[in-house]
Image: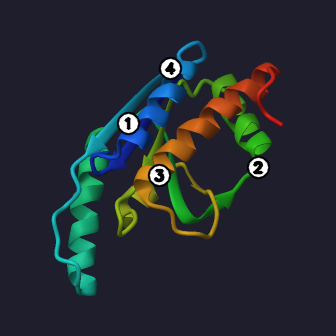
Amino acid sequence: MNITIVSVGKLKEKYLKMGIDEYVKRLGSYAKIEIIEVPDEKAPEQLSDAEMEIVKKKEGERILAKISPDTYIIALAINGKMKTSEQMAADLEALMTYGKSKIAFVIGGSLGLHEDVLKRADEQQSFGKMTLPHQLMKLVLVEQIYRSFRIMKGEPYHK
């Protein structure tokens, strides 16, 4: 299985990079994982609705340019479906069973994902109603992917 995480913005915090690198290393025996960062659109703090739409559209175009047409896309969105770790594992296993060997998780920028990305997504998943920094979300996501594989294999980790 090939898993790609496409996110907006460059990860700068060393402690987050170290955590992500650790889980990517652990995932190596289960799947090929690639992390792609697309540049965030520079914008002032105060934006009109129209300006926010332009920023999200440009970031969305960058995201979609990194994903091949045969990839199953899971967009992380606050209004997406919430799952337990066991449900996430079962869903990933079902995708693998039914021939979906390329999966991309998409994390938007600080303004969220553009409608074009959400329309292209095969599903939307939420990790809760709280807003998390998208850089921290990358660490949480890669840990949950690792946890999913451990659950699928019946290996100790998930408690």
- Which amino acid, by three-letter code, is at mark 4? Lys
Between disc 2 and disc 4, whose residue precedes? 4
Q: Which residue is mark 4?
A: 25
Kindly identify which numbered label has been placed on residue 69: 1
What's the image's color scheme? rainbow
- The answer to whether any part of residue 44 appears in the image is yes
Kindly identify which numbered label has been placed on residue 84: 2
- Compute the Cα span from label 3 to label 2: 19 Å
Report the front residue among 120 and 157. 157
Asked which quadrant contains residue 50, the reply is bottom left
- Compute the Cα span from label 4 to label 3: 18 Å
Asked which quadrant contains residue 93, the reply is top right
Between disc 2 and disc 1, whose residue precedes? 1
Callout 4 secondary element: helix
- Which amino acid, by three-letter code, is at mark 2? Thr
Kindly identify which numbered label has been placed on residue 136: 3
Q: Position of residue 5 (x, y in %)?
A: 43, 38
